[in-house]
Amino acid sequence: MKFAFIILIVFYFNSFCYSQDFRIGRNFVIAINNELAVNINGSVRFRIKELNGKEKIMDGGYMPGELYLSNKEDYLNFISDSLSGITLEFDNYVYKKNKMYISNYSVNISRYWLEYDYIILYIYNRSKNNKTNKYSFAWSFPSYSIPSKN
């Protein structure tokens, strides 16, 4: 009985914490070198440029299929009409031969793209070694595909 009670409390706490995130991109997928990106969650930031020239950084997160902001105030700012630009920034952690490699990405996005049924961000590393951070990216969403270079 105690075990069941503890499981119930853990489940309730987990669902409460999970519900505090504010979803902004449903069915949002990031693929890096044609592989689903799964090691991003704690490193997502949104660099917001407002019409008055101010810049603000908002913390967020990513799980395959979900892009979200961490708090309600940031969510309300994100959906306001006072934005002139949004840059999605994140780090991807890859482990190879007992070493960890971190790649940093910065991609301009449109808030309106997040209203599509799905969106896929394809990122292709152009550097052979992990010492440089050269990459290109492309977007794919219903009826559109937008290639870009960084």
Image (spheres, grey):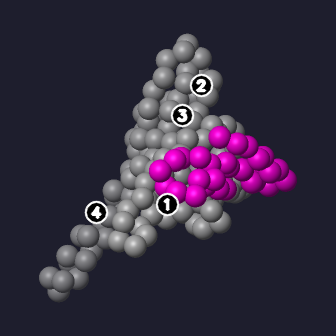
Structural distance between the alpha carbons of marks 4 and 3? 27 Å
Structural distance between the alpha carbons of marks 2 and 4? 34 Å
145 shown above or below 48:
below
Of the two numbered discs 1 and 4 on the same chain, state the one appearing first in sequence.
4
Structural distance between the alpha carbons of marks 1 and 3? 19 Å
Q: Residue at x 53, y 47 (%)?
A: 133
116 shown above or below 97:
above
Nearer to us: label 1 or label 4: 1
Q: Amino acid at mark 4?
A: Phe
- The magenta segment: 122-150
Left or right: where does residue 64 sit relative to residue 17? right
Of the two numbered discs 2 and 1 on the same chain, state the one appearing first in sequence.
1
Q: Amino acid at mark 3?
A: Phe
Residue 106's mark? none
Q: Amino acid at mark 2?
A: Leu
Q: Which one is nearer the viewer's eye here, 88 or 63?
A: 88
Residue 63's mark? 1
Residue 83's mark? 2
Structural distance between the alpha carbons of marks 1 and 4? 19 Å
Of the two numbered discs 2 and 4 on the same chain, state the one appearing first in sequence.
4
Left or right: where does residue 95 sit relative to residue 115? left
77 shown above or below 132:
above
Q: Residue at x 62, y 24 (%)?
A: 84
The reply to whether discs 3 and 2 touch (Cβ–Cβ < 8 Å) is yes
